[in-house]
Amino acid sequence: MPASRPIWKGQLRLSLVSIGVELYSATKPNAKPAFRQIHEPTGKPINYEKVVAGVGPVDKDEIMKGFEYEKGDYVLLTDDEIDAVKLETRKTLELTQFVTAGEIDPIYYDKPYFVVPSDELAEDAFRVIRDALRQSQKVGLGQLALRGKEYLVAIKPTGTGLLMETLHYEAEIRKSDPFFSEISAKEADPDLLEVATALIDKKTAKFDAGVFKDHYQAALRELIARKLKAKGRKISTKEEPPEHKPTGSNVVDLMAALKSSLESGSAKQAAKAAPRKKAS
């Protein structure tokens, strides 16, 4: 069992079958450098106070949650009143529908979580649901109340466990028409399309997330290390390369760029495949 604490404990339900499960975040919150705002003259961190206009700073016990039903008018709710809202999904995640994974548009996916059985007694039923999802190639859908919000979630097998992903509700997704309306429906030039497709085929490989690194975060950490080593002295930063502006006909430039990319890829592959000569 992982050292981190579960963010949720409850029942995973399929019809009349209920399984005790625990939920863990699948992402690392501390994977990227975190910054705080600092008061430069003193070097001390800046803190924020809860302030009311015309009153000044206020104590925490004077603060309530409010819903603005009209401009400037609020319905006030205490934490006890909010906690008293009883939802079955606070303790139970029921799989109410199943869909093929490809049916869910990627735009709906939000955040991943690991789902594990809460104890050995739950493992048998857990394995049945996991393997049934894998064999049927389906994703289970349900709803879960978590941290003051009820989420739409998708459950699917991963390794020996289950992966839960929160989904956006339809009302949370922007319509694409206003953004794409000015893009012409005209089809791409056939010759350009052929070369671009060939380039895609050449660069096609199995997905391996380990191949990709966050260069920006690495550069930030390098900058932080250099600043620490400099002990307050100013350090120089690398200049951004000048932006390349295309010239001439866009079609001609695009074709030349695509062909150059293809030839470059072929040359690199040929170099890798060519046997090395032994030094005499």
Image (tube, rainbow, N blue to C red):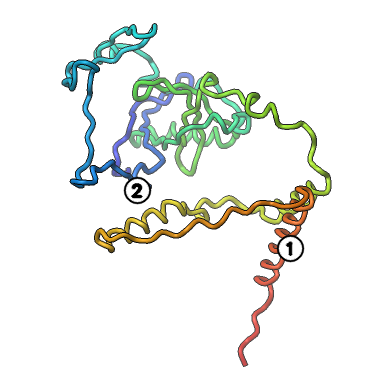
Left or right of 217 on screen, residue 48: left
- Asked if residue 37 can be seen in this view, the reply is yes
Q: Position of residue 166 (x, y in %)?
A: 46, 29
Sequence-first tag of 1 and 2: 2
Q: Quadrant of residue 115?
A: top left
59 or 104: nearer the eye? 59
Q: Is 66 above or below relative to 132?
A: above
Q: Quadrant of the C terminus?
A: bottom right
Q: What residue do we see at 69% from left, 62% from top?
A: 265
The CA span between labels 1 and 2 is 39 Å
Residue at (69% x, 64% y) in the render: 264
Report x, y in % for residue 274. Answer: 69, 75
For disc 1, the neighbor class at 10 Å (few under 14, some 14 to 19, many from 20) is few
Q: x, y percentage for residue 24?
A: 37, 36
User: Judging from the image, what secondary structure is the residue with disc 1 in?
Assistant: helix
Placement of 51 over or under 107, stated as above or below: above
Q: Amino acid at mark 2?
A: Pro
The answer to whether 55 appears left or right of 23 in the picture is left
Residue ID at (77%, 31%): 185
Count numbered badges in the picture.
2
Residue lying at the far bottom of the rendered structure: 280
Place of residue 249 in the rendered image (x, y in percent of width and height, measured from the top left):
78, 49
Residue 33 — which label?
2
Q: Is residue 60 visible?
A: no
- How many other residues sit within 10 Å of disc 2, few (<14), some (14-19) or many (≥20)? few
- Front residue of this view, candidates 221 and 240: 240
Amino acid type at circle 1 is Glu
Whether tag 1 and tag 2 are in contact, CB under 8 A, the answer is: no
Residue matched to label 1: 263
71 over 30 or under it: above or below: above
Quadrant of the rendered image containing residue 148: top left
Dot 2: what SS? Answer: loop
